[in-house]
Image (tube, rainbow, N blue to C red):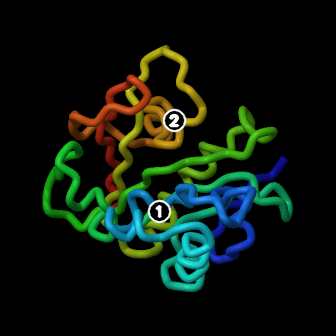
Amino acid sequence: MTIEVRPASVFADVRTLVGPKSPQATVCWCLSHRVPSRLNKELRGPERGEYVAELCRSQPPPGVLAYDGDEPVGWAAVAPRSATSFARNRKIPHVDDLPVWSLWCVRVRPGHRKKGISHALIAGAVEFARDHGAPAIEAYPLDNGDARVDLTMAYAGIRGNFERAGFVHAADTTSVLAGHPRILMRLDLR
């Protein structure tokens, strides 16, 4: 299996990874940290998909997708931190004033897990941020030690995967997800 990571500019493929089964459903679409809270609450049903479709047409696209051949098998949300809710998040600190990028969601489709796709997504997101001039990239994964993590809540990633990609612990946070503390990890891209 050869995994290729590409910018998330094909809406149908993004929908496969983060969209609902029913177009009327109001699910995350990976917008929770991308848009202000008020807009996130206002976007209902198909409006959420339409918003994401517009993001896919914009530059830069909203993240990266992993492909096994022509099949989309993974998603990673990555954007400048200043364009996300992490810019104002009180639980996740700012390390310094660098215009860092944030990587906050890594998702692999069921049936494709345990094949290294999350590692490819992290590497692809790093390259995507670097290609767009990011001086550094941050992630806010779970610091779960050896504990198992509910796959539904593992979207933030786990510390070990980011360590393997060269990220280092940069700060503790007061954020907790699925009973695990989250930490701020960073990779310098300069």
Relative to residue 179, is residue 91 depicted above or below?
Answer: below
Question: In the image, 63: left or right of 36?
Answer: right
The residue under label 2 is 153
Question: In the image, 111: left or right of 6?
Answer: right
x and y percentages locating residue 121 in the rendered image:
60, 52
In three-dimensional space, the C-alpha distance between marks 1 and 2, rounded to whole angstroms, equals 15 Å
The residue under label 1 is 31
Residue 151 disc label: none
Q: Toward which corner of the image does residue 18 lie, by quadrant?
A: bottom right
**Please, what secondary structure does the residue beneath circle 2 have?**
helix
Relative to residue 63, is residue 74 depicted above or below?
Answer: above
Task: Name which of mark 1 and mark 2 comes first in the sequence.
Answer: 1
Residue at the left extreme of this rendering? 96
Label 1, residues with CA under 10 Å away: few <14, some 14-19, many ≥20:
many
Identify the amino acid type marked 1.
Leu
Instruction: Check contact, mark 1 vs mark 2: CB within 8 A.
Output: no
x and y percentages locating residue 100 in the rendered image:
29, 62
**Please, what secondary structure does the residue beneath circle 1 have?**
loop
Question: In the image, 47: left or right of 169?
Answer: right
- Residue at image position (37%, 74%) is 133
Question: In the image, 92: left or right of 136?
Answer: left
Q: Nearer the viewer, residue 14 or 95?
A: 14
Placement of the C terminus among the 4 image quadrants = bottom left
Residue at the top extreme of this rendering? 146
Q: Nearer the viewer, residue 185 or 164?
A: 185
- Residue at image position (41%, 65%) is 40
- Residue at image position (51%, 35%) is 153
x and y percentages locating residue 115 in the rendered image:
74, 37
